[in-house]
Image: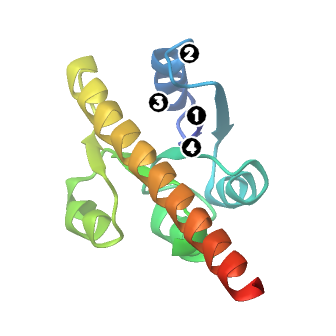
């Protein structure tokens, strides 16, 4: 699983990276320090999961989601110091909302929820591909 960690605070970003380093099923960690670099990372690296800060310079977390579009978004866990955005986060289908400072137990609960969501998305995507292939085969005979 490819994970993107987006936070303008280096210590906050490093903490998430440190927790996830070497942790299955994570196979690649990508970092971004602001909204524009997060958008670029999503488009080029195609992460499966993203830990996303809300308030950042350039483009905030919700601006990142709008710029990329729902069809290309990874599974999203918001990580922020502001509880005021929680309802809006779930409106954009975030799987969790970590409020800083969070403890490791809470982090791992969010991670489990997110990896389960990634697995579901993978199964659904494979099912859609299979259905498309079967439809092509059916139309071609």
Query: In the orientation shown, which residue stands out farthest toward the top?
Result: 22
Q: Give the quarter of the image for residue 130.
A: bottom right
Please tell me whether mark 2 or mark 3 is closer to you in this view: 2
| Residue drawn where x is 40% and y is 37% of the image | 115
**78 sits to left or right of 101:** right
Find residue 1 and name its label. 1
Q: CA distance from mark 1 to mark 2?
A: 12 Å
Q: Which residue is mark 4?
A: 8
Q: CA distance from mark 4 to mark 1?
A: 23 Å
Q: Which residue is mark 2?
A: 21
In x, y percent, where is residue 20? 49, 20
Nearest the viewer among 137 and 1 is: 137
Dot 1: few (<14), some (14–19), or many (≥20) neighbours within 10 Å? some
**60 sits to left or right of 137:** left
Q: Earlier in the sequence, mark 4 or mark 2?
A: 4
Quarter the C terminus occupies: bottom right
Q: Which residue is mark 3?
A: 12
Q: CA distance from mark 4 to mark 2?
A: 19 Å
């Amino acid at each position: 699983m490819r994970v993107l960690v987006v936070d303008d605070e280096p210590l906050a970003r490093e903490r998430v990276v440190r927790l996830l380093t070497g942790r299955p099923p994570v196979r690649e960690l990508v970092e971004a320090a602001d909204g524009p670099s997060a958008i670029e990372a999503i488009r080029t690296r195609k992460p499966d999961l993203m830990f996303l800060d809300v308030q950042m310079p350039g483009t905030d977390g919700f601006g990142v989601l709008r710029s990329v579009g729902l069809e290309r978004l990874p599974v999203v866990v918001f990580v922020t110091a502001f509880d005021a955005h929680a309802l809006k986060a779930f409106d954009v289908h975030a799987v969790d909302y970590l409020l800083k400072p969070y403890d490791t137990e809470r982090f791992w609960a969010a991670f489990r929820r997110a990896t389960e969501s990634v697995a579901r998305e993978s199964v659904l995507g494979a099912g859609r591909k299979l259905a498309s292939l079967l439809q092509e085969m059916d139309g071609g005979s």
